[in-house]
Image: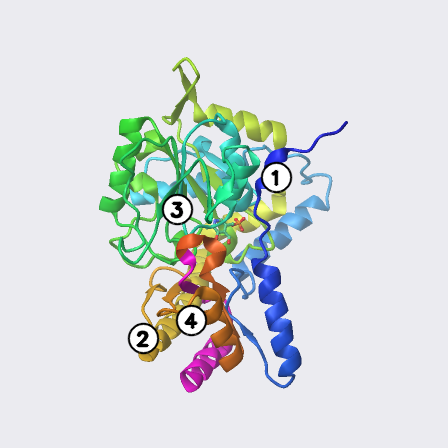
Amino acid sequence: MIRANDNYGKLKASYLFSDIRKKVEKYQQDNPDKAIIRLGIGDVTRALPDACIKAFHQGVDEMASDETFKGYGPEKGYEFLREKIARFDFQKRGADISPDEIFISDGSKCDTGNFQELFATDIRVAIPDPVYPVYLDSNIMAGRTGEFENGRYQGIHYLDCTAENGFLPEPPAETVDLIYLCFPNNPTGTTATKDELKKWVDYARANKALILFDAAYEAFIRNPEIPHSIYEIEGAKEVAVEFRSFSKLAGFTGTRCAFTVVPKECMIYSGSGEEISLNALWDRRQSTKFNGVSYPVQKAAEAVYSQEGQKQVKELVSYYLENADIVTAAMKSLGFDFVGGQDSPYVWIDGNGRDSWEFFDMLLTSAGVVCTPGAGFGKCGNRYIRISAFNSRENVQEAMARLKEAL
Ligand code: PLP
């Protein structure tokens, strides 16, 4: 008898997006003339930068001739891309990362979801709340949790991110082995300073723990005080893996390219306490289960680092950041407390006593504006909504004007 992985039965069905869809459909039926504006999505809306499109086309053309055709590429990604990433994203910021510590992939969703496979089932895992759901769900699937009780899975150490701690959890008093951190954060839009990250790096070094640092929104950091990479913190190379993506940086959500940094210094431990190279283990995993990102896509990603590409991605990100400014200015004038929207495309807004679905309903019914209820990201999101800056300037302006008029 073919038996199921029972851990999948523990997953809470996520009704979030289907519930949102039903509410939006009902509203549209009741208000057929009202154009709905969606500020709930975490997907980009603008076209790929011109430099990437040109390189993408050239890559496709190379596939059309026997002389330049490429078959299977290296599982880790082409050297031309890994070399640029190491130089531009890390070495230029004083972080000593080399190309063979970089693994190109087709997305940070896969990498953040897959990485936990390298660890024992009975490790203690710390996960923020609210959180990008992939970290939690992939650990549930792997059997690292017990039952779901009172909005929480047994066996997970939750790191509450609340207004009281400025949405930045402190390292726990007890020991955990694996820690997920995400800055700039999805969904709260908060960032972490070097001092704040240093506490986590010190904790991980003291406890032989590992940090999985998701920097998918790194490109949105404008404040020069905020580190772009965890490797800007001394000692982080021993205890941290970093995930980056071209999705939000350069509009690659539908094109698919990302990378994960696994430093050579990073060690994990066998049952008998012997050191194991995490870089070698991830290499082994990827070369067994992954066959690389297509050549034209890697050429398109490489173009991000050209002079033209750098200018174009900065413009792209600035466009969304200016949208975020419009959202935060509107929230200020409406008297809502919020965080984020500064070095991030997300604004996390306190419902001022409303629960997140009530707040969602209010925005939809009064203004035809769709946001994401915070409850979808964890128990600590119950009082919040997330507004995303990923939309056209016109739509963001119109949505905020409607809210100002309605509320
Ligand atoms: N990490 C975070 C925090 C995200 O919000 C997202 C996408 O929304 C991802 C990773 C996934 O990125 P990718 O498109 O590279 O799979």
Q: Residue 323, which numbered label? A: 4
Please state, as top left, top right, bottom left or bottom right, where the N terminus lies in the image.
top right
**Ligand 1 within 8 A of label 2's CB?**
no
Disc 2 + disc 4, Cβ < 8 Å: no
Alpha-carbon distance for marks 3 and 2? 27 Å
Q: Residue 184, which numbered label? A: none
Disc 3 + disc 2, Cβ < 8 Å: no
Q: Which residue is mark 3?
A: 128
Q: Which residues are magenta?
A: 381-407
Alpha-carbon distance for marks 4 and 1? 39 Å
**Ligand 1 within 8 A of label 1's CB?**
no
Label 3, residues with CA under 10 Å away: few <14, some 14-19, many ≥20: many
Q: What amino acid type should be assigned to the residue bearing mark 3? A: Pro
Query: What residue sits 49% from the left and 81% below the top?
Result: 366
Q: Helix or strand or loop: what does disc 3 sit on?
A: strand
Q: Which residue is mark 1?
A: 8
Q: Nearer the viewer, mark 4 or mark 3?
A: 3
Q: Which residue is mark 2?
A: 332
Query: What residue sits 32% from the left and 59% below the top?
Result: 222
Which one is nearer the viewer's eye here, 18 or 312? 18
Q: What amino acid type should be assigned to the residue bearing mark 1? A: Tyr
- In the rendered image, the vertical position of residue 340 relative to residue 135, given as above or below: below
Q: Position of residue 62 (x, y in %)?
A: 67, 46
Indicate left or right for 318 with 108 as reference.
left
Indicate left or right for 352 with 22 as reference.
left
